[in-house]
Image: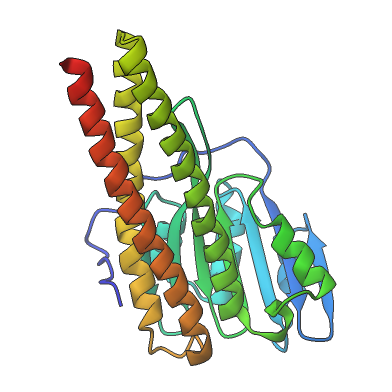
């Protein structure tokens, strides 16, 4: 899969530290049983892992090295992988001997032409999925409820299907953010024709900046998903690869929309100048 960084190469820039509490959560399930352990010490959480079930370990907050180290030692995570989890990276997928690593940007909303986002990283093993988030709160509340109440396919499938569902939720929210950008472009276009001012020029500049960020998030994400679709490591069941292929198609569609908005903002810039 993607080329690994060697020990001699410079590491990515570290994520900004936070004073917020790190929250650990374990959701453990199979087709017949379910239980959850929330806000527990890392040692207690590790003790509750069950190799005969699917174990979803979620970490909210990356600023406590002892927690990341303890999980890394238990799951035998490579030092370079741990470094990637705690650093700011472009979306990518990497295959290791005992697990797959996948990281991408999770977008929340857009306010005043500024996108709220964070990095989220996943480590997929045979019977576990680790998710590492920069801060508390995410988009997975409904999925947690579906797992708890045994709705849909999640409890009937393994950790790779859980990874698909989480990535799919993240990618779906990209549509919400892009739609918000589309509405802003329409509003700016109307203002330019009716009441052109320096304010509209500044708005266009902000949107162009966010589109550049989205481009950096989406193009590598397309390549990373392509690697998951073609995965031959055995961590993703062949029956589930079609789901990742569907998410890949969504990202391609998002890139098309992104390019359209890029052209529209360039056109608005020309109109405003003229």
Count of labels in the image? 0
- Which of 8/22 is in front? 22
**What residue sits 42% from the left and 76% below the top?**
245
**Residue 219 appears left or right of 105:** left
**What residue sits 48% from the left and 91% below the top?**
238
Residue 216: x, y in percent? 30, 49
Most distant residue in the front direction: 194
**Residue 159 appears left or right of 23:** left
**What residue sits 84% from the left and 71% below the top?**
149
Residue 211: x, y in percent? 33, 40
Query: Is 143 located above or below residue 100 in the figure?
Result: above
Residue 210: x, y in percent? 36, 36
Q: Is residue 197 visible?
A: yes
**What residue sits 34% from the left and 76% below the top?**
227
**Residue 2 appears left or right of 101:** left
Give the position of the C terminus as an image quadrant: top left
Give the position of the N terminus as an image quadrant: bottom left
Residue 3: x, y in percent? 25, 72
- Which of 60/269 is in front? 269
**Residue 40 appears left or right of 22:** right
Q: Is residue 90 visible?
A: no
Query: Is 47 located above or below residue 126 in the figure?
Result: above
């Amino acid at each position: 899969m993607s080329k690994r960084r060697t020990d001699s190469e410079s590491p990515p820039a570290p994520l900004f530290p936070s004073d917020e509490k790190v929250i650990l959560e374990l959701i453990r399930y199979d087709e017949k049983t379910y239980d959850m352990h929330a806000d527990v010490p890392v040692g207690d959480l590790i003790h509750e892992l069950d190799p005969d079930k699917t174990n979803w370990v979620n970490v909210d907050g990356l600023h406590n090295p002892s927690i990341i180290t303890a999980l890394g030692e238990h799951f035998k995570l490579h030092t370079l992988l741990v470094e990637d989890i705690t650093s700011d990276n472009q979306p990518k997928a990497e295959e290791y001997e005992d697990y797959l690593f996948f990281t991408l940007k999770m977008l929340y909303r857009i306010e005043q032409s500024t996108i709220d986002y964070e990095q989220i990283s996943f480590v997929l093993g045979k019977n576990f999925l680790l998710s590492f988030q920069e801060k508390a709160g995410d988009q997975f509340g409904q999925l947690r409820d579906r797992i708890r109440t045994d709705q849909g396919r999640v409890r009937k499938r393994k950790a790779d299907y859980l990874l698909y569902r989480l990535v799919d939720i993240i990618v779906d929210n990209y549509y919400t953010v892009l739609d918000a950008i589309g509405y802003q472009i329409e509003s700016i276009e109307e203002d330019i024709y009716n009441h052109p001012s320096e304010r509209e020029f500044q708005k266009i500049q902000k949107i162009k900046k966010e589109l550049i960020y989205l481009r950096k998030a989406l193009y590598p994400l397309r390549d990373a998903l392509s690697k998951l679709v073609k995965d031959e490591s055995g961590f993703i069941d062949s029956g589930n690869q079609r789901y990742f292929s569907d998410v890949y198609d969504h990202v391609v569609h998002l890139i098309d929309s992104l390019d359209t908005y890029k052209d529209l903002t360039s056109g608005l810039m020309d109109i405003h100048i003229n």
